[in-house]
Image: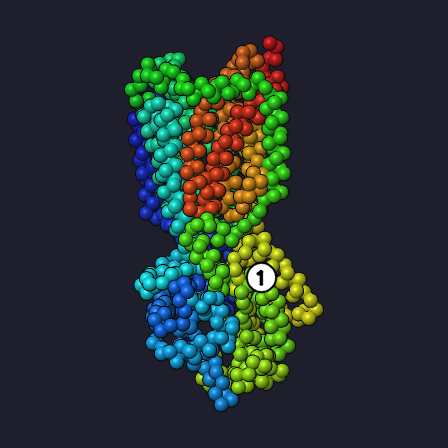
Amino acid sequence: MKQWFINQSVVHPKRSIIKSLLITLLMGTGIQHFVIEDDFMKMLPQDIPSMVTWNELKDEFGSTELMFLGFGNRGVDALNSKTLATLWDLSHEMETIEGVDEIMCISTADKMESLDGFLEVSSMQEYRDLNDEEIAALRKYLDENPKVKTRSIGSKGDYLNVIIRPLVGSKGNLLVGDLTQAADKYLGDYDVHWGGQAYLTGTLPALIRVDVMSLMRAGLIGMLLILLFSFRNISAVFAVLVTILLSMVFMIGFNGWMFYLTGSDAFLFGILNTSMPIILLTIANSYGVHVITKFFRKMRSNKDPRAAVEASLSSLILPIFLAAITTIAAFLCMIFAPLESLMGYGISISAGIVWAWVLSTVFLPSILVLKKWNPKASAVSNASHFERFVIAFGEHVIKRPKTVLSAGAVVIIIGVVGVFKLNIEVNLKSFFKPDNPIRQSLDFMDDEMTGTMDLQLLVNADLRSPDVLNQIVSIQEFMEKHESVTLSFSIADVIKQMHRMVNDDDPAFETIPDTREKINNLFTMYSMSGDPDDFSSLVDYDYKKGLATSMMRSISTRDVVKLVDEIETFLHQDEYSSLNITITGMLIVFRDLVGLIIRSSFISIFASILIIAFIAAYFFKHWIWGIFAVVPLSSAVILNFGLMGIFGVDLNHVTALLSAIIIGVGVDFAIHYISQFRTHLQRYGLDGDLSRETMRDVGFPVILDAASNMAFGALLFSEFVPMKHMGGLMVFAMVSTSMATLTLLAVLLEMSKKYLARIEGVSVQT
């Protein structure tokens, strides 16, 4: 097999290049079926209990993921004729937008009043243009109904609140686009703020992808400049770039064909797939760097490009193959992830890695064979300053094995300590830096409006029973005591308001009536001038199932868990034992989702390490090589999670995914080092400087690979906090895995060389 690959490049270079290009173009035609999906909700698993409950709730009551729009002018009373007329125009246009189920604001809401002992239901804002007397009456009504006022107007009275309920199944990204377009049409003279989980999930994917792709281009340029500085040859850098781009075209085309053939949402390109191009770039770059550096080293001795390519491939085919297969194994472990998109991620990037391996061992060497190289050129004949520095560094490491091991042990211990400080955070607000305009709008909505988060209680009970309704009131009062809850509302609030109105608007009667008959009479009276369907988002047709919603300011995931625990403890009291209540909503789904992702990431990490160890042991023909192969990875993973805990980097669905990806990116270094060490051991035994020669062969390409890929630290300049963390993790993955290979692994192999020589059947006599 090795000779077959060598012959494709050395004997048939033109044919190999043409075939590689044709296959890439053929697979690349799948780009026409490549679909970018910005619907965040499609990424969520549909089979976890909290999601099942949430979907049942939406089927019964409609969508519970709300969007919020606040607009006004600071210090200007929002209840004026101009602003109310603008609200009228805006809300009525928004009601016509496809994907909108309901618009809730002053201009679309109804009010209940007492009229000669009867309940009168009418529009809160009956006309577009109101006079001073009508505005005064509206103000009086809001002042007398605090919950209605809290939902309708900001705490300082200078901003109006518009609540948008999307239709179930509407595409959040398209809906957000249509709504913001309508807002831009009418609100040019106002300060505008958006909020709500539905708004964020509809906005975030596209914003992150655009931001990451622009920074990725900067990272690619940085990577090429580092390679140019190190190789000192434009042709070599161009050959690596072409290999990378062809791998990318193949992967994207494969992803498109898989979606076309399977129709599975797993192959939609969503927010979690954003890192795929970056990861494949680093892997393809790694293979190319090893081929080019080995080729230049061989050219220094024999001056013949064909002979140099043959010698390079003879040395590299096995380690590159093992690096590819172990990396693929690591990514294919993602098929066990709870999210469909992660399954597609693992399969698609594995296809890209396969093609990067083929191109690096066939296409790239063929280019090197056909290129006319000048053996006297500095890039070919002389080691660069960077290369000489790496060689000197390696010699210092080999001379101080005990110091290196001690330092490595201390670092790993620090990592273990930091693991216990990890914080899990899934609040989408934390994705934005404090000075980001979206973050500032969310802060405004938290400070002056009803907040940007919500929590639902699904109640299964007789909702015409006074006892049940009073219990719901008690639960709402308990929840409203929490500092993050701005208000709660349910069918009980409607009944209390109706009871007050039929008793001459006397506040003393804002209570639940004491008999079922009185409650039934209230609904009968409401139906005379109002529409009973007004309550469809609060209670089902038979009044056997109801929804209590709490509006909340943004809180951390830890506080969400604490709040839910407090509510569950409260509900476990004997007084509420007859109620069947389920806490649900997007917050609960996100909480459970992150738990799943983190568990699956850890499972994936351990499974990947075991599989990599097994593959290395099989191909290197002894279990000890498998153990050594995963030493750098294991130490890097521990240190990664530990430093995240120490430096306060939150663990969420993005950082958990990237932590698992470290294995896929970093396994190459150990494979190359072990392969070269083993080759020297078999050829020369213990005679000569085994570790120094290995370091001379492998040290420079490993460091160059890591250094060039660290250019993607450009993501540190992202507008989005998880992407900044992604850039930091990319840099750290390169540093930790490369340094662990050239220090910890190198020293362990040096100290174990006599034992390893006996395993390989090499004489230990020196």
Q: Which of 148 and 764 is in front in this view?
A: 148
Q: Which residue lies furthest to the right in this view?
A: 574
Residue 102: name its quadrant.
bottom left
Residue shown at the point (36%, 30%) measured from the top left: 225
Which amino acid, mark 1?
A: Glu
Query: Around disc 1, counting alpha carbons within 10 Å, would you say few (fewer than 14), some (14 to 19), or many (20 or more)?
Result: few
Can you say whether 696 is above or below 98 in the image?
above
Q: Check the picture and name the quadrant holding the N terminus.
A: top left
Is 401 left or right of 252, judged from the image as shown?
A: right
Residue 315: name its quadrant.
top left
Asked whether residue 230 appears in the rendered view, the answer is yes
Q: How far from the left and from the top, in percent, is residue 576?
A: 66, 70
Residue shown at the point (50%, 16%) measured from the top left: 693
Asked whether residue 344 appears in the rendered view, the answer is no
The residue wearing badge 1 is 483
Residue shown at the point (34%, 75%) measured from the top left: 128
Q: Nearer the viewer, residue 499 or 158?
A: 158
Q: Nearer the viewer, residue 458 or 712?
A: 712
Residue shown at the point (42%, 50%) measured from the top left: 436
Indicate the secondary structure of the residue bearing disc 1.
loop
Q: Check the picture and name the quadrant holding the C terminus.
A: top right
Can you say whether 497 is above or below 711 in the image?
below
Q: Which of 174 and 447 is in front in this view?
A: 447
Q: How far from the left and from the top, in percent, is residue 30?
A: 34, 44
Is 181 left or right of 628, judged from the image as shown?
A: left
